[in-house]
């Protein structure tokens, strides 16, 4: 069973870059009990979890934004028609007023708004762009996309960690139910023996009441364990976006320690692996790169000209009154190049200061992130090693409790002692089993946290 669980874990944690449509299909019921293992839970999370879906859409959005920036040097096409009518006084170029003018003109073709000698208000083919923006905006957008993709990988890792921990909690809750059921059985047997001894005059009625209290307490704890099983199942169902009527039950009946990380590896090697693989590092570096591009854009933008190009062709005609005479082909071409210095350069100077500060903030954020990752790896590593030692203690506790229970049970059946003497052995056995389950589950969860802190969970789904 232990090998089967570990195999499922390793397969799930190495299936990187699986797109939603490529993930294996899993039959998900809408009502009733669903048996689930860890590999299936991780697979369902990749295709059904809402946080992962949101992160995936954010990556698509950033890709579309990048394409828009890459298209800045592609002209815009406009087609249409326009009508212009003037009636009343009109001033000529030389200043003379024409007292009564009544004229009309019309245009249709590539562009719109052609009147008299002026170019169409809306060119048929137009391009207005600052050449610095055309160069730097795609570079910044590409870094932004890389940062968003890294955020998506972080969300992916975080959700899978939550799913793994929730599944291990579900297994522990089911095992707690089994321990509680065993304790109820032992307490019920104790209560029956004390009643028999009291009836034969060998025991006390007070012992009967003590045994009955223990039986009732164990029944209450069994109900608590069953309730916790339903609660942990509901949490896992939330992460997997399952229907409200679905109750999850783990396939794994037993809890075993999962050696995901080689405990012999030095801590400094684990830290180095984390700093190399964590998506948060890729995100912070992309943000630094984006800030650098923005700073360069602010520095060189005023030195690089803007261009405005326009080309229109269509049919134009007009005449006095509402007549349209002399309709013929018309072509307009415009080309402008200009430099712009905002606020006499004062605004540009402050903009450079702003971008330089943003770059410094990004670098400081990365420093803090590195410190946080190092601390996270160290804490997870310490917890794994500590829990590993506690497992040995818990195993010894269970063995001792089992031996004590067996000896007390034998003494009772051989009439060498009173049944009530088994009370403490029953309590110790239940406590030792629960301690073992809690310790192994905590060890496995700590291993997953350490594994994720190294950036090793699936993180390439796009």
Image (cartoon, rainbow, N blue to C red):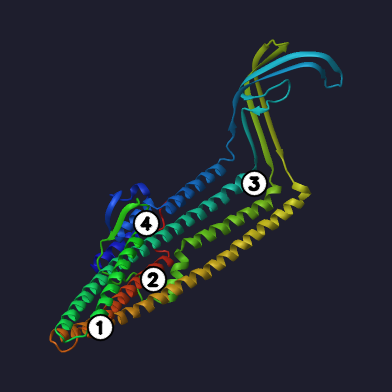
Residue under pointer 4: 16
Viewer-side label of 3, 1: 1
Q: Which mark is residue 442?
A: none
Viewer-side label of 4, 3: 4
On the image, the x and y values in percent for residue 8 come to 28, 62
Residue under pointer 3: 132
Does dot 1 land on a helix, a strand or a loop? helix
Does dot 4 land on a helix, a strand or a loop? loop
Q: Whole-Å distance between the Cαs marked 4 and 3?
A: 38 Å
Residue 233 against residue 90 in the figure, above or below:
below
Residue under pointer 1: 206
Does dot 2 land on a helix, a strand or a loop? helix
Give whichever of 315, 387 is nearer the camera: 387
Q: Earlier in the sequence, mark 2 or mark 3?
A: 3
Viewer-side label of 1, 2: 1
Does dot 3 land on a helix, a strand or a loop? helix
Q: Whole-Å distance between the Cαs marked 1 and 2?
A: 46 Å
What's the residue at 25%, 61% (across, down)?
Answer: 251
Residue under pointer 2: 446
Contact between marks 2 and 3 (CB within 8 A): the answer is: no
Q: Whole-Å distance between the Cαs marked 1 and 4?
A: 63 Å
Q: Whole-Å distance between the Cαs marked 2 and 4?
A: 22 Å
Task: Examine the rendering and report whether any part of residue 25 can be seen.
Answer: no
Crowd rating for badge 1 (residues with CA inside 10 Å; few <14, some 14–19, many 20+): few
Q: Earlier in the sequence, mark 1 or mark 2?
A: 1
What's the residue at 43%, 61% (across, down)?
Answer: 158
On the image, the x and y values in percent for residue 318 come to 69, 14
Q: Earlier in the sequence, mark 1 or mark 4?
A: 4
Residue 61 against residue 274 in the figure, above or below:
above
Viewer-side label of 1, 4: 1
Q: Earlier in the sequence, mark 3 or mark 1?
A: 3
């Amino acid at each position: 069973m232990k090998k089967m669980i570990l195999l499922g874990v390793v397969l799930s944690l190495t299936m990187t870059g699986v797109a939603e449509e490529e993930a294996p299909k899993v039959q998900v019921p809408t009502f009733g009990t669903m048996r689930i293992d860890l590999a299936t839970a991780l697979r369902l999370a990749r295709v059904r979890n809402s946080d992962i879906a949101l992160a995936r859409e954010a990556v698509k959005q950033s890709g579309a934004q990048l394409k828009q920036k890459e298209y800045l040097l592609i002209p815009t096409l406009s087609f249409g028609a326009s009508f212009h009518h003037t009636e009343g006084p009109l001033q000529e170029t030389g200043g003379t007023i024409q007292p009564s003018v009544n004229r009309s003109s019309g245009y249709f073709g590539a562009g719109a708004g052609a009147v008299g000698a002026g170019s169409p208000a809306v060119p048929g083919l137009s391009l207005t762009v600052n050449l610095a923006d055309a160069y730097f905006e795609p570079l910044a957008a590409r870094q932004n996309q890389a940062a968003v993709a890294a955020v998506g990988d972080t969300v992916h890792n975080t959700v899978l960690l939550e799913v793994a921990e929730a599944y291990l909690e579900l297994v522990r809750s089911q095992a707690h139910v089994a321990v509680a059921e065993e304790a109820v059985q032992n307490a019920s047997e104790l209560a029956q023996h004390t009643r028999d001894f009291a009836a034969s005059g060998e025991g006390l009625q007070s012992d009967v009441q003590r045994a009955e209290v223990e039986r009732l307490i164990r029944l209450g704890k069994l109900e608590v364990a069953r309730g916790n099983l339903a609660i942990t199942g509901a949490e896992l169902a939330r992460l997997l976006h399952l229907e409200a009527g679905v109750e999850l039950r783990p396939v794994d009946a037993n809890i075993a320690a999962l050696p995901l990380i080689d405990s012999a590896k030095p801590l400094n090697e684990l830290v180095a692996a984390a700093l190399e693989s964590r998506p948060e590092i890729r995100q912070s570096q992309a943000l630094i790169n984006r800030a650098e591009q923005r700073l360069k854009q602010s520095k060189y933008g005023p030195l690089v000209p803007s261009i405005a190009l326009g080309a229109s062709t269509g049919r134009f005609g007009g005449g006095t009154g509402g007549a349209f005479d002399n309709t013929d082909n018309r072509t307009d071409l415009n080309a402008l190049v200009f430099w712009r210095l905002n606020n006499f350069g004062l605004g540009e100077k402050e903009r450079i200061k702003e971008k330089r500060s943003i770059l410094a903030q990004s670098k400081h954020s990365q420093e803090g992130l590195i410190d946080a990752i190092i601390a996270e790896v160290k804490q997870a590593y310490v917890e794994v090693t500590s829990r590993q030692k506690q497992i040995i203690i818990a195993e010894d506790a269970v063995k001792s409790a089992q031996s004590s229970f067996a000896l007390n049970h034998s003494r009772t059946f051989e009439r060498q002692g009173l049944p009530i003497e088994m009370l403490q052995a029953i309590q110790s056995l239940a406590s030792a089993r629960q301690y073992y389950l809690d310790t192994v589950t905590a060890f496995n969860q700590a291993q997953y946290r350490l594994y994720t802190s190294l950036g090793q969970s699936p993180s390439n789904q796009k």
